[in-house]
Image (cartoon, rainbow, N blue to C red):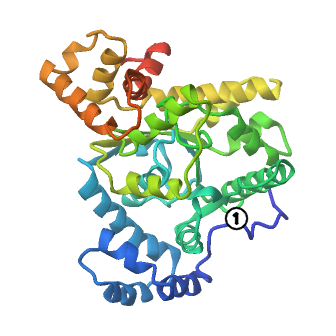
Amino acid sequence: MTSNIDFEQIRSYTDQEFPEVRDRLISEGILSFIVPKVFPDYSTEEFAGFFKQINSVADFQARVIYPAVKHILTHTSEGFTYTGLENLEKGKPYLFISNHRDIVLDPALLNFALFEAGFNTAEVAIGDNLLHTKWIEDLARLNKSFIVRRSLNSRELVLASKVLSEYIGYNILEKSNSIWIAQRQGRAKDGNDKTQVGILNMILMACEQNQRDYLSSLNIAPVSVSYEKDPCDADKVNELYQQVYSGGYQKRDGEDVESMKKGLLGDKGKIHMHFSSSLSNDISDLDGDLHKNDLIEKICDLIDLDILNNYKLYQRNYMAYDLYFEDAIYRDKYTWTDRDNFIHLVENNLKSIPGLSSDHFSIFYKMYAQPLINKLQLGLTS
């Protein structure tokens, strides 16, 4: 496909634009906020000098982003593992669709793994609701991010979705660039990893051929990311509680940026990511005359099955399941001491929530139990 649509407002930055954007970031003094946290061995001035020597997106990812993510993982996790890259072909573009738990880290970890294994990194989607300042937008677009425009009225949203769809198709089919997009809009705060039909509806807006064949041509590859601990779990519990018991939840100004910081700098325990094979053959095997809604539903099911099947469960998922259902089905996965320590940890995590009640604990336990619940519902090995 060849697109005549203008991607200027959403596209990632090019190598030609890199020096100007780099110098803008340096002159605006942004490095003083970033360098101490992820490059503590540098002074801000030393890092600025180092940054000045970088002149391309690929060099930026190799010399700045990769070491930064590595530093974050070293200091805020108990290790990051990944599997399944043997399912992918180097040089082949994919539409990576993953579950969504962390605003920044989900795509950052995907590109970290791809880079480390010698694959081309992917362009990644980021919502404009997260780009509160120009410097955040600049940093994201330097790092191969393209913008999902959400802060629009209904008519503008339709037009923006069409542009986004064209951008995804154009990059994969014409430029051979891989793309990452989450399976849903917003994080799965309740732990329920389900692909939204709206995501595939958006992707199909650029389709000018048989819809099944078009989706097959995009090389959709599901990716499953599993965090042992969620640094934002108490905030998510508070939000979910208010949605159920208080008639809705109103975000505070700057809350998204705060969540980004917590997700990056908070304790995540162990992290695992699995790359599944492309679904192209599975999609091609579907009936080519399926109604669009039925086609999308079947492909969503394929994505969900892969993501859940490869979701790594940790001890706290089993403990949370037993605590939520007031049972001891998975008693072989932990000791009573482990369970008591987990209960105390949850109490400590939630103690800052105003009006703390048993319902908050129930929401917390279900959040961590949900991946196991979903696996059991699909008949997958727990």
> What percent of the width, then of the height, locates residue 137?
58, 69
Task: Please name whichever residue, 275 or 158, is drawn nearer the observer in this view of the structure.
Answer: 158
Task: Please name whichever residue, 149 or 300, is drawn nearer the observer in this view of the structure.
Answer: 149
Q: Secondary structure at mark 1?
A: loop
Return the residue at label 1. Answer: 10
> What percent of the width, then of the height, locates residue 142?
55, 72
State whether residue 371 is above or below residue 27. above
Residue positioned 81% across, 52% down in the render: 153
* Quadrant occupied by the N terminus: bottom right
Report whether residue 302 is seen: yes
State whether residue 300 is above or below residue 154. above
Left or right: residue 254 versus residue 219 is left
Label 1 CA crowd tier, 10 Å (few <14, some 14–19, many 20+): many
State whether residue 349 is above or below residue 29. above
Left or right: residue 123 versus residue 85 is right
Residue positioned 62% across, 30% down in the render: 247
* Quadrant occupied by the C terminus: top left
Task: Please name whichever residue, 281 or 231, is drawn nearer the observer in this view of the structure.
Answer: 231
> What percent of the width, then of the height, locates residue 220?
61, 41
Residue positioned 40% across, 51% down in the render: 263
> What percent of the width, then of the height, locates residue 156?
83, 54
Task: Please name whichever residue, 113 or 147, is drawn nearer the observer in this view of the structure.
Answer: 147
Q: Amino acid at mark 1?
A: Ile
State whether residue 24 is above or below residue 164. below
Residue positioned 47% across, 20% down in the render: 374
Report whether residue 275 is seen: no
